[in-house]
Image: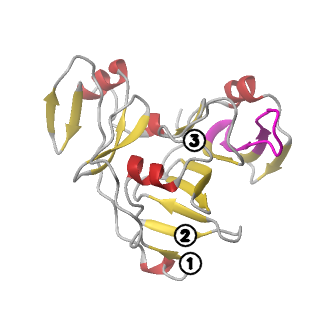
Amino acid sequence: MTIRGGGRIIRRMRSVILAVLCSLAALPAAAQDTCRDGSGLPEPRVQETAPQPNQFYRVAGRGLACAVGNAEGEAMSQHERPVTFLPCLRIGAVGIADGRAAVEQLLGQPQRTRDLNRRSQLRVYAIPQRSLPEPMYVVTYQDDVVVGLQMFGPPTEMPATFAGMALGDPVEKVIDTLGTPSRRCLTRSPGTETWMWQPFPIGVDVLDGRVVGFKVTWPAGRPTPD
């Protein structure tokens, strides 16, 4: 595979995976009243995680990386496409930059919609299964393109993961997969924290030692992805 980091390319094995490496940023002072850092949490039980296409993984001593598939990684390596972590901003079968028509072909029609502004709309989709309550997708569209995505609720009967993690997983798996979060912020739901790994626009909601939600967004200020 091919791993890019620090301006050099290391080739090993036969497949191509491009890693977008980035160190975790410091906690902003403005968020200190509702957020704290990851101190006090257990250390990862494994040194690093194995790269899988379109998933974030942890590189020992380097932070998080985004692995992509062979064709996409080769195009980035040849400077035919920009190096980006966009392919890893996915929860289950839905990802940032997907079109609304493709999303609704998978999820069906939304249960609720809300206009955010002239160009943006929020749509809520249930994930049908036998148990109640049902897990939910909350998708934010800009010009009918996904720019924000959240999944929350009980464990899904059908596989729907983020970076190999699923709703209901223990927090130990989150730390093993992504490392210690740079920020832990209180949410409106009592007892629930959102864990974040700056500068990546990702979050994991945890409650009572279990995963209850995933969040990914398109970085603010960047053009809407095609």
Task: Give amino acid for label 3.
Answer: Ala
Place of residue 15 in the rendered image (x, y in percent of width and height, measured from the top left):
27, 19
| Residue with the mark numbered 2 | 185
Q: How many angstroms separate mark 1 from mark 3 (CA)?
A: 26 Å
Which disc is residue 34 wearing? 1
Place of residue 192 in the rendered image (x, y in percent of width and height, measured from the top left):
64, 66
Query: Could you say which quadrant of the image residue 141 lies in?
Result: top right
| Front one among 72 and 58 | 58
Is residue 220 at least partly visible in the picture? Answer: no
Secondary element under disc 1, as helix, strand or loop, is: loop
Specify few, some or many for label 1: CA neighbours under 10 Å numbering under 14, 14-19, or 20 or more.
few
Task: Give amino acid for label 2.
Answer: Cys
Specify few, some or many for label 2: CA neighbours under 10 Å numbering under 14, 14-19, or 20 or more.
some
Task: Give amino acid for label 1.
Answer: Thr
Magenta stretch bounds? 123-146
From the viewer's perspective, is 10 left or right of 188? left
The answer to which of marks 1 and 3 sits earlier in the sequence is: 1
The answer to which of marks 2 and 3 sits earlier in the sequence is: 3
Secondary element under disc 2, as helix, strand or loop, is: strand
| Residue with the mark numbered 3 | 166
Secondary element under disc 3, as helix, strand or loop, is: loop
From the viewer's perspective, is 11 left or right of 184? left
Asked if 188 appears above or below 163 in the picture, the reply is: below
Place of residue 195 in the rendered image (x, y in percent of width and height, measured from the top left):
51, 61
Q: Quadrant of the N terminus?
A: top left
| Front one among 114 and 137 | 137
